[in-house]
Image (cartoon, helix red, strand yellow):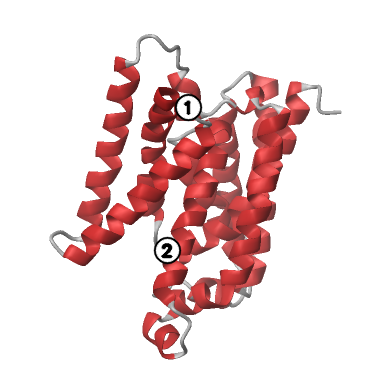
Amino acid sequence: MLDDFFTRAMVAGVGLALTAGPLGCFVVWRRMAYFGDTMAHSALLGVALAFLFQINLMAGVFIVATLASVALLFLQRRGALSTDALLGILSHSTLALGLVMVAFMSWIRIDLMGFLFGDILAVSRFDIAMIYGGGALVLGVLAWLWRPLLAATVNTEIAEAEGLRPERARFVFMLLMAAVIAIAMKIVGILLITSLLIIPAAAGRRFAATPEGMAIAASLAGVLAVVGGLSASLSFDTPSGPSIVVVALVLFLLSLVRLPEGRGTGETGETS
């Protein structure tokens, strides 16, 4: 069944969408889109280091994205610059370092466009196993972390008073983001990863009355985006990663047409 490249791409994309949906809800609620971009841009440096030291690409991306998160936490505690300035520095510097390293490694042939915009049609059975295995691990940890992370999203002080350790929840969430970025890189590419986290979650918010409902709706919107985007890519010979993001955008625009009568918890969770 998985011998056909299009079938493998569809299975891989659906697995990623199911994982990215709930995680993307917290990105939207906590207003962490720029942080997601920063971690995604650092992925290219992870790719370059993975080729240099001959380690698994996903492992290289995960390590570098994790180090970028730790660097952000350290610099925030120093208080020298605002968070958005620190994110800008980390985002562009890691991307530039990755590009420079790739340029210097002339002895290795690297499909830079594939890493930047994804190459889902080239996924292997091993990639699918990594996506579903890593995705199951991410969702399992997120389920364990759901209550403290949601409480910290609504009000950090109350979460601390209840002994939910919001700082620990935040750091673990950053690790989960790093894992999803490592998994998603081959499917939608470094420059489009954050959009697959944010757009389905934003579309699902309009149809959810609870945070859990929004997580499910975001996953379903992501699955529809993958199926529609890959089908459009096959029909119109367009790039697969960008096609998925465009379909996700269409779903978001359609969600704006049909607003619910009342806003539920999925909307109020944005206040932090």
List x then y, in percent, for residue 12. Answer: 69, 37
- What residue lies at 37% left-to-right and 39% top-to-bottom? 41
Checking the image for residue 115, the label placed there is: 1
Crowding near pointer 1: few (<14 within 10 Å), some, many (20+)? some
Q: In this view of the protein, can residue 77 be seen by the observer?
A: yes
Q: Nearer the viewer, mark 1 or mark 2?
A: 2
List x then y, in percent, for residue 219. Answer: 66, 54
- Residue ID for mark 2: 171
In this view of the protein, which residue sits in the foreground, 233 or 91?
91
Crowding near pointer 2: few (<14 within 10 Å), some, many (20+)? some
Does 143 appear above or below 133?
below
Checking the image for residue 150, the label placed there is: none
Horizontal relation, residue 206 to residue 105: left or right: right
Q: Quadrant of the C terminus?
A: bottom left
List x then y, in percent, for residue 77. Answer: 22, 66
- Quarter occupied by residue 240: top right
For marks 1 and 2 on the same chain, the one whose residue lies earlier in the sequence: 1
In this view of the protein, which residue sits in the foreground, 31 or 72?
72
Residue found farthest to the left: 80
- What residue lies at 45% left-to-right and 74% top-to-bottom? 153
List x then y, in percent, for residue 64. Answer: 39, 42
Disc 1 marks which amino acid? Phe
Disc 2 marks which amino acid? Phe
Q: In this view of the protein, can residue 224 be seen by the observer?
A: no
Residue found farthest to the right: 1
Q: How many marks?
A: 2
Under circle 2, the secondary element is: helix
- What residue lies at 54% left-to-right and 47% top-to-bottom? 180
- What residue lies at 53% left-to-right and 56% top-to-bottom? 24
Does 117 appear above or below 219?
above
Q: Quadrant of the N terminus?
A: top right
Does 134 appear above or below 209?
above
